[in-house]
Amino acid sequence: MDRKRTEYDVLDRAYKVSEPYFSTVSPSKWTITEYDLYGRPVKNIFPTGKLLPHLITGYPQLW
């Protein structure tokens, strides 16, 4: 059966989420989320090494 593990930081935010893995082994691939001082996610780092920055602005989008 496939499992997924989530690890939380001291502020109870999910900062590490594993890729699905079999229950007989430990997870080896993780997606890591980094937060700013206000607790907003600012970047995801995927197991492939790809970075996904989050855009944070104080202005509403005007389309």
Image (spheres, rainbow, N blue to C red):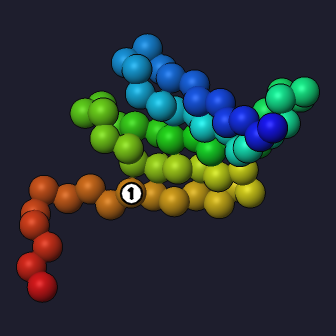
> Secondary structure beneath disc 1?
loop
**Vertical position of residue 13 compared to residue 51: above or below:** above
Along the viewing direction, whichever of 35 and 4 lies nearer the viewer: 4
User: Is 38 placed left or right of 60 in the picture?
Assistant: right
- In the rendered image, the residue lying farthest to the right is 24
**Vertical position of residue 53 compared to residue 20: above or below:** below
Query: Residue at coordinates 62% horizontally, 44% vertically from top-left?
Result: 31
Q: Which residue is mark 1?
A: 54
The picture places residue 26, in percent across and down from the top left corner, at 83, 27
The picture places residue 6, in percent across and down from the top left corner, at 59, 30
The picture places residue 14, in percent across and down from the top left corner, at 48, 31
Query: Residue at coordinates 43% horizontally, 14% vertically from top-left?
Result: 10
Quarter residue 3 falls in: top right
Asked if one can make out residue 44 in the rendered structure from this viewpoint, the answer is: yes
Amino acid under disc 1: His
User: Is 2 placed left or right of 34 in the picture?
Assistant: right
The picture places residue 2, in percent across and down from the top left corner, at 77, 40
